[in-house]
Amino acid sequence: MSTMKIPKIYAKGDRTIWIVVIILSVISVLAVYSATGSLAYSKQGGDTEHYMIKHLGLVVTGLFLMYFTHLANYKIFSRIGQLAIWVAFPLLAITLLGGKVNDASRWITVPLINVSFQTSDFAKLALIMYLARLLSRKQDNIKDFKESFIPLMIPIGLTCILILPENFSTAAILFVTCLIILFIGRVNLKHLFMLVAIGIIGFVLFIIVALNFDLPGRIGTWKARIENFRSGDSESNYQSEQAKIAIANGGIFGKGPGNSSQRNFLPQSYSDFIFAFIIEEYGFLGATFLMFLYLILFFRVIKMVRYSPQAFATFLAIGISLMLVFQAFINMAVAVNLFPVTGQALPLISMGGTSIWFTSISIGIILCVSRFCVKEEQGEEVAENE
């Protein structure tokens, strides 16, 4: 009697990154399950498993997306980026016209399948892929202002400008990430300094206008957040004050999983402020461990790309890792009241929808690149588990 053989699934790419991803996913499920307890009682009649099961489904789906993405040839993302950037521009423009969630025009719904996603998540990834493609192709004349710098700045400027009105923090993170990629890509430092100066002047003028005039929409929201952050008033900084209490409750070792008291008072304890919630339950040691995981991811990419087969692969992996780590540390800085509230999720940790999928695809691309990074000493593919 013959027996059917079940095919084995092998994960390729850098093993350390895979381990970091799995640990972050486990932390995410545990933290979201605990953080959504009070939300479940108010919204789901006490069904505490509802949000955990929903989030677990998103995380597992994200891992599948990551797995299938990492099996591709990294060169395909050069062509995908070339097409995706021209899809991102109209999507961002359409999003500004509607799709408000929490008073922000950040979402768009895909017809027929009725799935909503933040167009900025798609645009960030599209821009990094396209920028990596342009940089790698213009290395022979990278110092030329007209031939290289202007073509590089057009997609960066358009993308950031379209994101800026409704999502300032995302536009800022993306812009800084692109600056660093340009620096790594050997763009003329004079041009970069000029760009930084223009950016600083524009930012200062924007802040002056926002603080001195009553402007509609999200600009008014930014103004209120900045003023509240500067004032330090406890009533107008309710989220930050509750986050501080959660951090103080956590101490060194934390109160233990499921023992949080601030989940009943801390808004967005399962998303924007999940880092403060993690500190309450797992303490300073747990928070340090979490930060360490993101740093491992970033430095593993830096080590990996030393053996990258092409400039495109290098720019692609570094750009994506920078963007993810910047976002993670901005979220953490907000949670500990170093920055005003930004609305940035903690990558792979915060409860969310399609943002988890885009993050998973992003890490899948990094893992895809790692498969082709060759160790000089051994002449073998890095962590290729065939």
Image (cartoon, grey):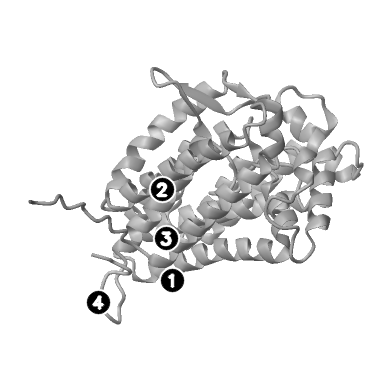
* Disc 2 secondary structure class: helix
Q: Earlier in the sequence, mark 4 or mark 2?
A: 2
* Disc 3 secondary structure class: helix
Number of other residues with Cα within 10 Å of mark 1, as a class: few under 14, some 14 to 19, many 20 or more:
few
Quickly name the residue at label 1: 303
Number of other residues with Cα within 10 Å of mark 2, as a class: few under 14, some 14 to 19, many 20 or more:
many
Q: State the mark number for residue 18.
A: 3
Total numbered labels placed on residues in the image: 4
Q: Position of residue 269 (x, y in %)?
A: 70, 42
Q: Are marks 3 and 4 in contact (CB under 8 Å)?
A: no
User: Which dot, 3 or 4, sits closer to the camera?
Assistant: 3
Q: Say if residue 345 shows up in the picture.
A: no
State the separation of the CA atoms marked 1 and 2.
Answer: 23 Å
Q: Position of residue 216 (x, y in %)?
A: 74, 22
State the separation of the CA atoms marked 3 and 4.
Answer: 22 Å
Q: Position of residue 171 (x, y in %)?
A: 59, 41
Q: State the mark number for residue 76.
A: none
State the separation of the CA atoms marked 4 and 2.
Answer: 29 Å
Q: Residue furthest bottom?
A: 377
Q: Say if residue 239 shows up in the picture.
A: yes
State the separation of the CA atoms marked 2 and 3.
Answer: 10 Å
Number of other residues with Cα within 10 Å of mark 4, as a class: few under 14, some 14 to 19, many 20 or more:
few
Q: Earlier in the sequence, mark 4 or mark 1?
A: 1
Quickly name the residue at label 2: 63
Left-right relation of 295 to 288: left
